[in-house]
Amino acid sequence: MRWAARQAALTGSELHPIQAWQLPPNHGMPVDYSDVDFAARAHKNLEHIIREVLGEHPTTPVTPEVLVGHPPAVLIEAAADADLLVVGSHGHGAFSGMLLGSVGQHCAQHAACPVVIVRTGDR
């Protein structure tokens, strides 16, 4: 998010951080998720990252969103009218799909706007 925040500040743009989440796979086994509030965890995680990167009082306008769904699809839809989509990548391994990450690779191929993929250590 640091790269995206710097870019937004340089261009006078707004920052729209998105936390996309979906239920963990159950691999065909019944799982009771009733005691886990995944949405609340996602909101808390996103708020923590925003505070960590931008501080308590950011100078760049920030509109965070927590959305439910398959992350690549959620990001593509959310970025439909965006000027730029910035995604992080853990980038393990030597193959391009692994370097870009599956979410980043999907976004780069399908987004309607330019996509910047930032390696985890470069955020």
Image (spheres, grey):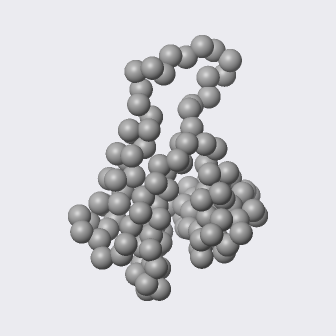
Q: Nearer the viewer, residue 121 or 17?
A: 17
The total of numbered circles placed on residues is 0
Quadrant containing the N terminus is: bottom left
- Quadrant assignment, res 2: bottom left
- Find residue 31 and report its horizontal and vertical position in percent: 55, 17
Rendered residue at 39%/46% (across/down):
43
Rendered residue at 60%/59% (across/down):
78
Q: Nearer the viewer, residue 39 or 121?
A: 39
Judged left or right of residue 1, residue 24 is: right
Quadrant containing the C terminus is: bottom left
Rendered residue at 38%/38% (across/down):
40
The relative height of residue 53 versus residue 70 in the rendered view (above or below) is: below
Which residue reaches farthest front?
A: 81
Judged left or right of residue 92, residue 15 is: left
- Find residue 26 and report its horizontal and vertical position in percent: 61, 23
Judged left or right of residue 51, residue 22 is: right
The relative height of residue 98 versus residue 111 in the rendered view (above or below) is: above
Which residue reaches farthest right?
A: 109
Residue 105, visible in the rendered structure = no
Residue 85, visible in the rendered structure = yes
Which residue reaches farthest left?
A: 56
Rendered residue at 62%/51% (across/down):
74
- Find residue 71 and report its horizontal and vertical position in percent: 61, 48
Q: Nearer the viewer, residue 42 or 29?
A: 42
